[in-house]
Amino acid sequence: MPHTASAVTDNPGSSPAAWWAVISLALGAFGLVTAEFLPISLLTPMASELNASNGAVGQAITATAVVAAFAGPLVVLCSGRLDRRMIICGLMIVLLLSCVLSAWAPNISVLLIARGLLGFSLGSFWAMMTPLALRLVPSNKVPKAISIILMGISLATVFAAPLGAFLGELWGWRPTFLAASGIAIVALAIQMLTLPKLPANVAPNLASFKAALTRRAVAIGLTAGLLIISGHFAALTFIRPFLEEVPRLDVPTVSLALLAFGVSGFFGNLAGGAVAARSPAWAVSSCAFLISTVALALILFGKQADVALPAIALWGFAFGAFPVSISIWNARAATDHAESAGALLSMTFQVAIAAGAILGGLLIDSFNTLAVIIYAAVAAGAGAALMLVQGRAIERRRT
């Protein structure tokens, strides 16, 4: 297809699929999301040692998301014709620095700076993920490539939260962050070996962002994503205090619940990719409705451990399907503006994460942990309804 302002050498189908390069990106995603999720499982001991409230330390998630929201579009705009391989490797170096600085942080201010570095790497990686998938594999293999990359996120949800809680109890939260830096080193090494040179033939500009944003399918996906992600992260950021206070689970059982969340998320990624390859709108709306239903179950029956544990697992399955589903929707909505649409989706993710964490912190400090679950039920349900009605209407017109 002809190059546009943001179709940065996509040219799908012109060369064999570079699956090892795709896998290297999945490993980078694994390292980034592992680092992003660590405060969720380490929130209580971090707050205690840093002499801050749970709500305040929860803003470590916010700092990451705020920086990531701006980093994605800015890096895409400023990257010009730079080799995307160099950019991805540079982002892994920033991830390494963030983990080391988090492990050293003497106070919450330094921790927030470290998390800001993570946000820069995370937002930029998210922005370039789908465009790179479009360039590394033929067009008919793009859903599979996106699923593989996002499988790194699913695996991170399996290991990051429960392993973080376990290692935090065993070693302390600082050595746990330091251990996460090893993932960045491994990811960097493998990417340097497997990623081909990816120079940009045409540099993205503001016109390409405007063209992508004014496309109705893109706008609907971003709005639905904003609602669903903000609700999800408002609750997930403070899930450990909820599990400790409502069903009154001890630390080993909390770790088990988070492990169930992560394992289910891995299978949700597989299911979401399969459904989204046929209908991204159905995939997005289905997993969002499931998140809303699970939140409602926790509101009504969360005091019962035998309800809370399977509910957390089902929640993990639902959200595991979401990133791959919304990414495939976004890729189909703007294949001719890949980097710009990818940057907008990245920005939406991070704004929603920041909004969810901020609102969750306010709700948990002003009311109780149940309030964040109520918000998750309402926001996810609204996003699901939007995609089911408007998204499906767009899909029917395409066919």
Image: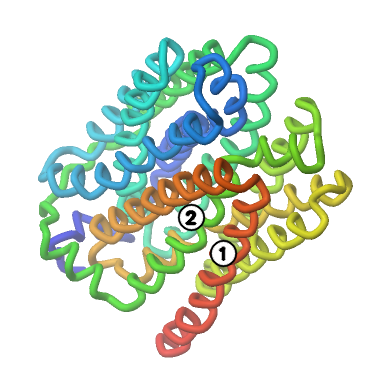
- Mark 1: secondary structure: helix
Residue found at x 51% / y 18%: 51
Name the one closer to the observer, 6 or 127.
127
Q: Quick one: quadrant of the N terminus?
A: bottom left
- Residue at point 74% right, 34% down? 244
Q: Nearer the viewer, residue 357 or 97?
A: 357
Task: Of the two numbered discs 1 and 2 on the same chain, state the one appearing first in sequence.
Answer: 2
Q: Identify residue for label 1.
A: 380
Q: Which mark is residue 230?
A: 2
Q: Is residue 338 left or right of residue 287?
A: left
User: In the image, residue 182 lies at what x, y percent?
Assistant: 47, 16
Image disc number at residue 41: none
CA gap, disc 1 and disc 2: 8 Å
Q: Is residue 276 above or below residue 153?
A: below
Which amino acid, by three-letter code, is at mark 1? Ala
Q: Is residue 266 in view from this perspective? A: no
Q: Residue at x 63, y 17 (%)?
A: 168
Q: Position of residue 86 (x, y in %)?
A: 23, 31
Q: Which quadrant would the C terminus be assigned to in this image? A: bottom left
Q: Amino acid at mark 2?
A: Ser
- Give above or below for 245 relative to 193: below
Q: Is label 2 in a helix, a strand or a loop?
A: helix
State the image quarter where residue 336 is shown. Answer: bottom left
Residue 75 screen position, x and y as percent:
20, 42
**Left of 126 or right of it: where is 283?**
right
Q: Is residue 315 visible?
A: yes
Which of the two residues, 197 or 123, is positioned nearer the viewer here? 123
Q: Residues within 10 Å of mark 2 (few under 14, many from 20)?
A: many
Residue at screen point 49% across, 56% down: 229
Write down the quadrant of residue 112 in the picture.
top left
